[in-house]
């Protein structure tokens, strides 16, 4: 099972910062996960919320600030809000799994997928990246532009046939929240050649539960000792 560090080593360092991502790779995770929004001047920035209030010393909407304005803010411990390009470069340098999937990008708003793809291509990282979203058409759009890019669809419910939704979106991976996960969901996905990564798994009890269902990986704020993983 792959361990995916949720917003980096977010239990130890400020989430979605270069510091947090670097720490996660030092702890030998398989992948790190980040969230992407667009700034007022069209730059892709790594932050979870669409507002600045929770994770920085700023206020207001991300989309109403230019990149220079965002870079002036403290995202925790003196860290700045990174750009997607900065994260891609860091992953290329720090990942312990060269040539393998090392970065999970969650697109938090529609209509930025082409720009995300262009950034990935500029860093020559198609093999190292998975792009996922709650907006399932993002996967379809990305596949129309680049068939080789791995994509995923995120679920916060339990559709009748989630694997069919993934197929319709041409997605390679399903990301159901573990509260909605079932053994049948995993089996049905695997029968269609679709992987299942779940989250957010932060307790040993939940880790054992999702492992018993046969998932391929999990997203976590807690970076488990790999000896604990069944």
Image (cartoon, helix red, strand yellow):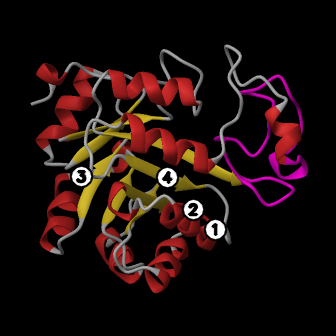
Question: Does 48 appear in magenta?
Answer: yes
First along the sequence among labels 3 and 4: 4
Circle number at residue 115: 1
Point out the image quarter for the N terminus.
top left
Instruction: Identify the main secondary structure in magenta.
Output: loop
- Circles 2 and 3: CB distance less than 8 Å? no
Q: Is residue 165 left or right of residue 87?
A: left
Q: Is residue 51 above or below residue 126?
A: above
Are there few (<14), some (14-19), or many (20+) residues within 10 Å of tag 2?
Answer: some
Distance between mark 1 and mark 2 Cα atoms: 6 Å
- Give the residue at mark 2: 119
- The answer to whether residue 142 is above or below residue 56 is below
- Between 164 and 77, the residue placed more toward the observer is 77
Circle 3 SS class: loop
Q: Which mark's residue is nearer the viewer, 1 or 3?
A: 1
Of marks 2 and 3, the one in the foreground: 2
Q: Does dot 2 land on a helix, a strand or a loop?
A: helix
Q: Quadrant of residue 58?
A: top right
Mark 4 vs 2, N-terminal side: 4
Q: Residues within 10 Å of mark 3 (few under 14, many from 20)?
A: some
> At 39% across and 58% down in the image, what residue appears?
130
Is 109 situated above or below 208? below
The answer to whether residue 76 is above or below residue 128 is above
Cα–Cα span, label 2 and label 3: 35 Å
The residue carrying pointer 4 sits among few (fewer than 14), some (14 to 19) or many (20 or more) residues within 10 Å by Cα, namely many
Q: Which mark is residue 105?
A: 4
């Amino acid at each position: 099972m792959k361990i995916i560090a949720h917003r980096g080593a977010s239990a130890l360092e400020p989430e979605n910062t270069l510091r947090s991502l670097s720490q996660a790779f030092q702890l030998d995770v398989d992948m790190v996960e980040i969230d992407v929004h667009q700034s007022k001047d069209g730059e892709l920035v790594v932050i979870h919320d669409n507002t600045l209030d929770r994770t920085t010393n700023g206020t207001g909407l991300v989309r109403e600030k230019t990149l220079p304005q965002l870079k002036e803010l403290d995202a925790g411990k003196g860290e700045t809000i990174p750009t997607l390009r900065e994260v891609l470069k860091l992953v290329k340098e720090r990942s312990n799994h060269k040539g393998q999937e090392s970065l999970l990008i969650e697109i938090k708003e529609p209509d930025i997928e082409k720009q995300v793809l262009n950034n990935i291509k500029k860093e020559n990282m198609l093999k190292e990246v998975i792009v996922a979203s709650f907006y399932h058409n993002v996967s379809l759009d990305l596949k129309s532009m680049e068939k080789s890019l791995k994509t995923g669809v995120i679920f916060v419910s339990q559709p009748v046939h989630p694997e069919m939704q993934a197929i319709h979106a041409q997605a390679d991976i399903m990301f159901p929240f573990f509260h909605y996960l079932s053994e049948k969901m995993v089996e049905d996905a695997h029968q269609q050649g679709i992987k299942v990564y779940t989250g957010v798994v932060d307790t040993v009890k939940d880790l054992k539960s999702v492992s018993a269902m046969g998932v391929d990986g999990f997203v976590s704020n807690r970076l488990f000792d790999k000896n604990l993983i069944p």
